[in-house]
Amino acid sequence: MTRLTTAPASAPTAAALSPSAYQDPFARAHLPPAPLWPDFCFDLPELAYPARLNCVAALLDAQVAAGGGDRVAVIGEHARWSYRQLQQQVDRIAHVLREDLGLVSGNRVLLRGANNPMMAACILAVLKAGCIAVPTMPLLRAAELGTIANKAQVDAVLCAASLRAEIDAMPAAPARVLFFNGDADSAALEARMARYDAPFDAADSAADDVCLISFTSGTTGIPKGTMHFHRDVLAICDCFPRHTLGTGAADIFIGTPPLAFTFGLGGLLLFPLRFGAAGVLLEKLTPETLLAAIAKYRATVCFTAPTFYRQMAPLAANYDLSSLTRSVSAGEALPLATRQSWQEATGLRMIDGIGATELLHIFISAAGDAIRPGATGKPVPGYQACILDHDGKPVGPGVIGRLAVKGPTGCRYLADPRQGEYVLDGWNLTGDAYEMDADGYFYYRSRTDDMIISAGYNIAGAEVEDVLMRHPAVAECGVIGRPDEERGQVVEAHVVLRPGFAPDAAMARALQDYVKAAIAPYKYPRAVRFLDKLPRTETGKLQRFKLRASSTTDLKTPT
Ligand code: 3UK
């Protein structure tokens, strides 16, 4: 294990790194100071990467060189590219970046597009050209894109034509902008690609040169840019999918998370490529169309968020899902009721996994017989985890505390003072309250700052949600602590009812009684609000701050 914190505070971060191969030193110059780095561990033999490494050469060129050029790499609604075809597209785009746009290694390229093969090729091309990808979520607006472009000092933009408006409206948009999947005008990427036939030799890059700046979907403040190295991209492939999921060349990955979210980038593109498998990249999926696509493409592995599984479960019987052998849930806590309904509907035991943008992908999970319902799982091989108390001391089984993780990947915020909040004594603190059992299984309780404290009791909203979700009238729910003069906070449930159930006082009372009968009565929601739909991010996460901020027109029943 390498402790990078041993460098004196004044030493440049680069002291712990190998020499950069980049011409543009921006990324190296904006890494956090060495004392604020997490520890990195490379205990597994498969995590020993060479000092010079371009991850796309390892993911794509290596597959073609090994004779896998004719295998299917990516599948979209209108395209099915083999590894060789994907390599050709990537090489053409890399030529355009370096020769047409005049970019040099280490420059940043903002990427914007829904999930489709061209978007995938653009991301890979940026990395192969030795530039740094800054993927952005399709729903972001001009102002947010401007903030990101400014923070990452973006040099060029590759954008899907359908998402052009917000780029045009962006404050101080970079001069170099090309559009893909649109009309053949002067700014069309494809027209320029057509001029290049020659292979593109992957740019020389250090294994610890930054290749990706992924912005967190932060709920408050300026989004944080997390910086990841070429070796990090391979490390996530060599941990969760290799050890927990068990991935082979015959696998066909499918799912909803955007490629701009590292959950999707790993699960739908990097993981399949690492194993010579295929990734299905589809835009605007709904529970129905995802089920239909699993059947159509004979997908074997599905990646999506818990709420999607909850919505798919009752519809699953209408589709041929016989190809599917693994389903992965991440992004937020998996309610037991969702695990059960999905298993009843499909026979599949859900692989829950917690990941984070700061750590790039999943670091605690369990599959097959190792699954313990209610627990997220154990540290994925390559990672270590423990629970820390307020003072940063490890606590034993049965005590709720702060989840702390380390492994081959970890938090490096781009020029951000919040680095010091995420890293403590070499551990990455994800901001989650977790508990461990005597067998080393990790149980999610809440976000650290979402723990509800009511009349002196600690109440985890997720536990109350778990119970409510079992009630036949409840489609979805979110439980928060709401300020209360007498109790500090009271438990408040925001509930979306299934069709045919009335949002009235009798229903609120029925739900309260249901909770009281299932878990300790002090946890029951003293306030119940009915909504048509819950506020969620583009990544499927419940926006609790919106529930907290929402109006006070409650349907409150007497306590
Ligand atoms: C929460 C979970 C309980 C948790 C992500 C897989 O979600 C991802 O990254 P984000 O940066 O959010 C991280 C936070 O989300 N969370 C994620 N998964 C779970 N909570 N159970 C889970 N299974 O609060 C965590 O700190 O958006 C997930 C892969 C890559 C990712 N970036």
Image (cartoon, rainbow, N blue to C red):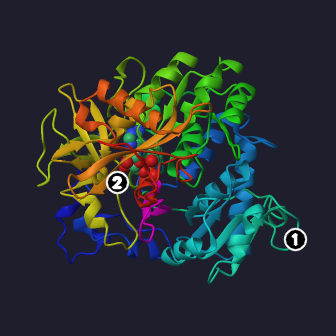
Q: Position of residue 540 (x, y in %)?
A: 53, 47
In magenta stretch: residue 476 = no
Q: Quadrant of residue 80?
A: top right
Q: As displayed, is residue 198 above or below residue 272?
A: below
Q: Nearer the viewer, residue 122 or 78?
A: 78
Residue 390: tell me if it is visible. yes
Q: Residue at coordinates 38% horizontally, 74% vertically from top-left?
A: 415
- Which residues, given as a range, are shown in magenta? 208-231
Query: Is the C-beta of the residue carrying label 1 under 8 Å from the nearest atom of ligand 1?
Result: no
Q: Which mark is residue 234?
A: none
> Which quarter of the image is occupied by the C terminus?
top left
In magenta stretch: residue 218 = yes
Q: Which residue is mark 2?
A: 410
Q: Position of residue 110 (x, y in %)?
A: 60, 68
**SS for callout 2:** loop
The type of residue carrying mark 2 is Gly
The type of residue carrying mark 1 is Asp
Query: Is the C-beta of the residue carrying label 2 under 8 Å from the nearest atom of ligand 1?
Result: no
Q: As displayed, is residue 282 above or below residue 376?
A: below
Q: As displayed, is residue 500 above or below residue 54?
A: above
Q: Which mark is residue 185?
A: 1
Crowding at dot 1, Cα within 10 Å, few <14 / some 14-19 / many 20+, comes out as few
Residue extending furthest toward the bottom: 172
Distance in Å between CA atoms under marks 2 and 1:
42 Å
Q: Residue at coordinates 57% horizontally, 18% vertically from top-left?
A: 345
Q: Quadrant of residue 111?
A: bottom right
Which of the two discs, 2 and 1, labels the residue nearer the N terminus? 1
